[in-house]
Amino acid sequence: MTDPSLIERYMGFYHKFFASSLDPSYSYVLDLYIDNFLAGQAIIYYIRGGLRGVGVVYYVVVDERFRRRGLGKILVSSAEQIFEDLNLDFSIATASIDNVVSHRMFKSLSYDEEDLERISRICSHQIQEMILKLSCGYEDDLLFYKDLRRPAYENNIKSLCETINQLDKDVVERHWLRSCYRPWRSYRSLIRL
C-alpha cells in the first residue's frame, strides 16, 4: 500500500494509522495527481464472503488547493469502477452527520443514506453490527450505500441488508479484528506511552 500521506496531512495521524492497517491483499490507495502533485487520495477495500461482496470507501481526501473541482467524486467513481470490476454487489461508506461535504458528494453520486442507528430497526441488530464491522464506522452516524447491480433509483436498504447477511461472518470478523479492533488497541497503547 502506498503512503496515505494526504490522510495524515488533513485528518491526522490517527486516521493514517487506521488507513495503513488495512490488509494490502484487499485494499487500495487511489492517488489522483494533477501536474505531478498529489491532489487527492482515497483508501478503499472490499470484503467478499460467499457469493457476495461489498466495497468500502474508507477515506476520501482532496488537497485544499484542489477542492470544489469534483476530485472527490472522481475518486469515488474510480472506487466504484474497481468494485464493479471485482463483481461486488454494493459500495458503502460511513460519515459523521456533520460532514456536509461527504453528504453532498455521496448524494450527488446517487448513494442513498441511512442513519446507522436505524439499521437495527430496519433489518436487525446483527446486520447493523456487521455493517459497523465492515466499515470500521464506529465514530460515524450515517451509512451511504449504492447497489452496483441495479440503477440508482432501485437502491434499497433491504437489499443491502440481505447482501450483508449473506456474507461469511467469519470473513467479516477477521477483517474487523485485523483492520478495526487491533489497530484501535495498538493506537490506544501508543497514546498511553
Image (cartoon, rainbow, N blue to C red):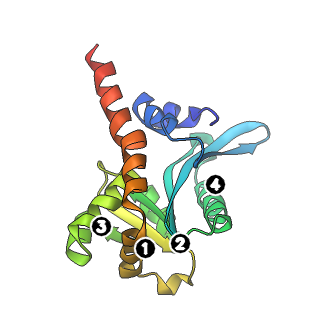
Nearest the viewer among 44 and 126 is: 126
Q: Secondary structure at mark 3?
A: helix
Task: Please tell me which residue is depicted at 50% across the width and 86% down the height of the picture.
Answer: 153
Tell me which corner region of the image, top left, top right, bottom left or bottom right, holds residue 93. Answer: bottom left
Q: Secondary structure at mark 1?
A: helix
Mark 2, Cα crowd under 10 Å, few <14 / some 14-19 / many 20+, is: many
Q: Position of residue 122 (x, y in %)?
A: 25, 77
- Tag shown at residue 89: 2
Q: Which residue is mark 3?
A: 127
> Could you tell me the amino acid type at mark 1?
Thr
Quadrant placement of the N terminus: top right
Answer whether labels 4 and 1 touch (C-beta < 8 Å). Answer: no
Callout 3–callout 1 Cβ contact below 8 Å: no
Q: Residue at x 36, y 51 (%)?
A: 173
User: Are discs 2 and 3 less than 8 Å apart at CB?
Assistant: no
- Say whether marks 2 and 4 touch (CB < 8 Å): no
**Alpha carbon distance from label 1 to label 2:** 7 Å
Q: CA distance from mark 3 to mark 1?
A: 10 Å
Task: Bin the neighbour count of mark 4 within 10 Å (Cα to Cα): few under 14, some 14-19, many 20 and up.
Answer: some
Label 2 to label 4: alpha-carbon separation = 24 Å
Helix, strand or loop at label 2? It is loop
Residue 131 location (% of width, % of height):
35, 61
Q: Which numbered circle lies on residue 71? A: 4
Asked whether residue 178 appears in the rendered view, the answer is yes
Q: How many marks?
A: 4
**Of helix, strand and loop, which one carries label 4?**
helix
Q: What residue appears at the point 50 percent right and 41 percent down from the top-left corner?
A: 22
Q: Where's residue 48, x and y in %?
A: 52, 61
